[in-house]
């Protein structure tokens, strides 16, 4: 059957790619183009031949029967049944071959979009004869689109895991640190600040520049955005649930990888720059949770066209961040107040202790002074008593002396005026 040539033409894309790739790198780039051309030519050839056969069949058999007789009506119904069976089989064969070639040879969304356009034109053309099969194209192209995007994402995740493992095994942390630009201190830098919810409807938010300090996360984000860029060429709404599910799985796998890396670097006996490896592992985990995950979610919604949802999510995230900041400041203020209260209590206790110590010293001094005064008073009393004893003893001695003198015989004193005494001048 000459119509099978179109199907065979689609399947020959692999041979054309192999022949084109033998010319080196330039031939490799032209091989992809050759694949696309072969697939598109095959679809167009198959469409042309199927449509020609159907139109010729209708032109021949539909007008050859007279509508007046019952036998002609039965023949008419039979001919249309044959045409319907043949068309259904041709379409099924086309879809089976198309699915195989799309999965095997289409590796970029530009080619996928061209193939989708060609197949949709084929289906709409067949719709003029009652054989429109456009709804049957979605199960072929949507899974392939999701697989292409997941391919970019898995490459980025595997690259990050390989980098972490290599640095961990070698005990070096240099490849895990980058240069943090001055603008990265503000978070994102540039226009479209995601943290500040200044996000335009038609643009993807600017990536956070602080991730430049963590090259593995930056490369992972680049691979993620590369996968989203594929949606700019071929955006199929039916693939949105699968893409969102794939992103959730990607985030979960990335979290598990970062947690596993953190546990691995915390293992005792890690050689090399163990301290820096542990530091960067903890920092990468916190940055992924606080910065990268919300940014990835916002970018996905913008890429899918859900701008309002993305902005609402961004506002909610900003509000949650603000609440977290306020709560943190409140906790910090409470801690500072508690520390201040503790310091005041310690100061007061110290002052009370010093006052008690001073009072004890003063009391001791007063007691010592009182004791000294008492001792002096005692000494003075003793001295007074001694003096009194001495005075009493002296008085007794004087009395005794006086008594002794009173008992001694008294000698007569000569009477200088005695008449019998010689005259001092003598007698004449």
Image: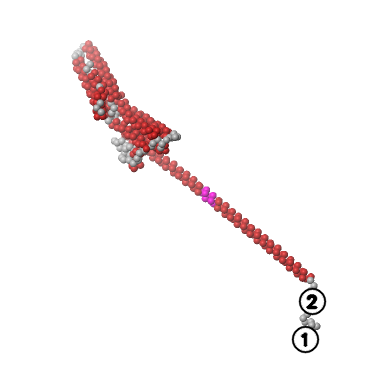
Where is 51 relative to 183, above or below?
Answer: above
Q: Helix or strand or loop: what does disc 2 sit on?
A: loop
Report if residue 404 lies within the magenta region. no
Q: Position of residue 34 (x, y in %)?
A: 24, 26
Where is 361 relative to 144, above or below?
Answer: below
Question: Is label 1 or label 2 in front?
Answer: 1
Q: Which mark is residue 412?
A: 2
Q: Which residues are magenta?
A: 348-355
Horizontal arrangement in the rendering, residue 152 relative to residue 72 (left or right): right
Where is 130 relative to 280, above or below?
Answer: above
Q: Position of residue 395 (x, y in %)?
A: 72, 66
Query: Viewer-proximal residue, 417 or 201?
Result: 417
Horizontal arrangement in the rendering, residue 66 relative to residue 265 (left or right): left
Where is 160 relative to 384, above or below?
Answer: above
Q: Which residue is mark 1?
A: 426
Query: Viewer-proximal residue, 275 or 94?
Result: 275
Residue lying farthest to the top in this orientation: 71
Q: Position of residue 322 (x, y in %)?
A: 38, 40
Q: Quadrant of residue 2?
A: top left
* Mark 1: few/some/many CA within 10 Å (<14, 14-19, 20+): few
> How far apart are labels 1 and 2 at the CA level?
24 Å
Res 230 seen here? yes
Looking at the image, which residue is at 77% across and 82% down?
A: 417
Q: Quadrant of the C terminus?
A: bottom right
Q: Position of residue 348 (x, y in %)?
A: 51, 49
Please tell me whether the stretch drawn in magenta is mainly helix, strand or loop. Answer: helix
Res 118 seen here? no
Looking at the image, which residue is at 24% across and 13% down?
A: 78
């Amino acid at each position: 059957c000459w119509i099978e040539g179109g199907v065979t033409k689609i399947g020959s894309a692999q041979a054309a790619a192999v022949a084109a790739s033998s010319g080196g790198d330039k031939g490799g780039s032209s091989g992809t183009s050759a694949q696309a051309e072969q697939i598109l030519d095959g679809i167009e050839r198959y469409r042309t031949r199927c449509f020609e056969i159907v139109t010729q069949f209708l032109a021949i058999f539909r007008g050859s029967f007279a509508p007046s007789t019952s036998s002609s009506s039965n023949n008419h119904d039979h001919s249309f049944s044959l045409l319907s069976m043949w068309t259904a089989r041709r379409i099924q064969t086309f879809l089976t071959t198309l699915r195989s070639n799309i999965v095997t040879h289409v590796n970029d969304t530009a080619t996928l979009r061209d193939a989708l356009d060609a197949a949709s034109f084929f289906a709409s053309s067949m719709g003029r004869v009652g054989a429109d099969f456009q709804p049957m194209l979605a199960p072929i192209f949507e899974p392939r689109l999701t697989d292409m995007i997941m391919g970019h994402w898995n490459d980025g995740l595997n690259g990050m895991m390989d980098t972490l493992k290599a640095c961990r095994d070698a005990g070096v942390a240099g490849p895990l640190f980058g240069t943090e630009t001055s603008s990265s201190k503000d978070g994102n830098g540039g226009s479209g600040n995601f943290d500040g919810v200044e996000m335009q409807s038609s643009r993807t938010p600017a990536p956070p520049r602080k991730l430049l300090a963590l090259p593995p996360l930056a490369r992972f984000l680049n691979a993620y955005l590369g996968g989203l860029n594929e949606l700019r060429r071929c955006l199929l709404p039916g693939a949105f649930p699968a893409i969102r599910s794939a992103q959730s799985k990607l985030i979960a796998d990335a979290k598990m990888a970062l947690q596993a890396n953190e546990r691995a670097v915390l293992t005792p006996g890690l050689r090399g720059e163990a301290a820096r490896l542990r530091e960067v592992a903890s920092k990468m985990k916190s940055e992924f949770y606080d910065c990268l995950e919300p940014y990835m979610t916002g970018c996905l919604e913008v890429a899918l066209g859900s701008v309002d949802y993305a902005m609402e999510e961004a506002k909610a995230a900003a509000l949650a961040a603000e609440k977290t900041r306020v709560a943190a400041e409140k906790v910090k203020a409470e801690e500072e107040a508690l520390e201040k209260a503790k310091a005041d209590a310690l100061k007061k206790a110290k002052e009370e202790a010093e006052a008690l110590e001073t009072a004890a010293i003063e009391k001791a001094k007063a007691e010592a002074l009182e004791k000294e005064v008492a001792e002096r008073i005692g000494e003075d009393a003793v001295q007074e008593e001694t003096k009194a004893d001495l005075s009493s003893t002296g008085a007794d001695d004087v009395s005794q002396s006086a008594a002794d003198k009173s008992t001694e015989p008294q000698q007569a004193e000569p009477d200088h005026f005695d008449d019998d005494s010689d005259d001092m001048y003598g007698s004449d």
